[in-house]
Image (cartoon, rainbow, N blue to C red):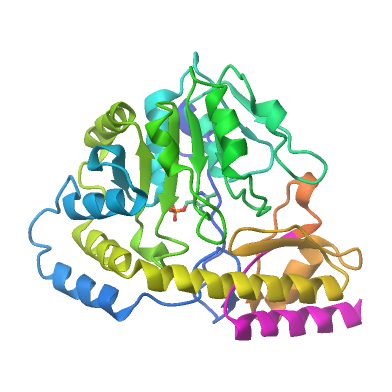
Amino acid sequence: MSKFTSKRLAAMVPYVPGEQPRERKYIKLNTNESPFPPREAVTEAAKAAAGTCHLYCDPEVTALTAALAERYGVQPENVLITNGSDEILNFFFMAFCDEESGVSYPDISYGFYSVFAGLYHLPAKEIPLDDELRIRVEDWLDRDTNLVFANPNAPTGRYLPPAEVERIVATNRNRIVVVDEAYIDFGGETVAPLIKKYDNLLVTGTFSKSRALAGGRVGFGIADAAMIGELKQIKYSTNPYNVNSVSAAMALAALREDEVYMDRCHTVMENRAYTTKALEALGFAVIPSMANFVFAKSERIGGEALYLALKERGILVRHFKNPRIKDYNRITIGTREQMDALLEAVNEILKEV
Ligand code: PMP
């Protein structure tokens, strides 16, 4: 702690991102990236945009906003593009969460929710998942705080169908319900169209997973125009040029080939089914996942021990120390070759225990 540390800083518990090691080449199955690189049209668009970088980027991100609105069947005023979806989540916490509104999220979910709640000193409630790590919808009806959850949830991969999400949104009309759809393209159905019916719904999404742009940092929010307008106030008060020209051009090029990207999601879903079956054959309990990862545990080896043994063999997965989920590992679904390498390593490790 330096002599300049403020009370706020001292009280902060920062988010810990998954490992991004540079010292050794790992098979990276720890941060839910796409195993496929961006398409050529995307890298070409990046090159072209780089040539314009002596000028500031478009603060309205006009072309991408229009294309995304069309893709989700809403109007441009319903869309805000951000620097990854972490930023739209931050904007939501900054704009709408305070002492009076509070905020609630599942006890097991994306770690950033509690980090933001701490950063902004919010009265926060964790709503427990059930014993099978499912959201119990009844616990989410008629609440007295803003609500945020990921669907599919992370790190479990569990998915709530749109009708269930709508029940939550419909019974909390005086509070905002954020549905974080970072992983929706791997078999789920977006609830974005519901923003026309509910002015308390904010749907967030990202180009980091299904559209292979994690390093490009492009995310978005879809909501009623009034809510988007207020979120924009935060954007213009913090970082008006939050989406740089190169990233915006890459995202637009990716969206123009959306069918190809959605096809790739199907490949990931096939590999997910393959991996689930193979892990189950090795005795793992695997939570049914609608995301580009699976959450699995084995009675034969502890979660952390498996994580470390895989790391030694050059394979990274994600282990969380939270006691409720410490027996599990979250394994990103990659190519068939990557999954075969993982399964072979797991098999070897289990033979040694
Ligand atoms: N929401 C969830 C549930 C996530 O797992 C992630 C990825 N860490 C994000 C949001 C943020 O992703 P990004 O900022 O790359 O869009």
Which quadrant does the C terminus fall into?
A: bottom right
Which one is nearer the viewer's eye here, 265 or 129?
A: 265
Given residues 237 and 8, the one toward you in this image is 237
Residue 347 colored magenta?
A: yes
Please tell me which residue lies in front, 86 or 132.
132
Q: Is residue 267 visible?
A: yes
Q: Is residue 298 above or below residue 178?
A: below
The quadrant where residue 345 appears: bottom right
Q: Main secondary structure of the magenta part?
A: helix
Q: Is residue 224 magenta?
A: no
In front: 279, or 169?
169
Magenta residues, start to end: 329-353
Asked if 202 appears above or below 189 in the picture, the reply is: above
Is 262 located above or below residue 154 in the figure?
A: below
Residue 316 is at least partly visible in this image: no
Q: Residue 269 at x, y = what percent?
A: 60, 69
At which x and y percent is residue 299? Answer: 91, 63
Q: Quadrant of residue 145?
A: top right
Number of numbered callouts drawn: 0
On the rendered structure, is 308 left or right of 248? right
- At horizontal 75% and vertical 45% (from top left) the residue drawn is 133
Q: Can you give x and y, in whole percent of width and height, for residue 338 in the image?
A: 62, 82
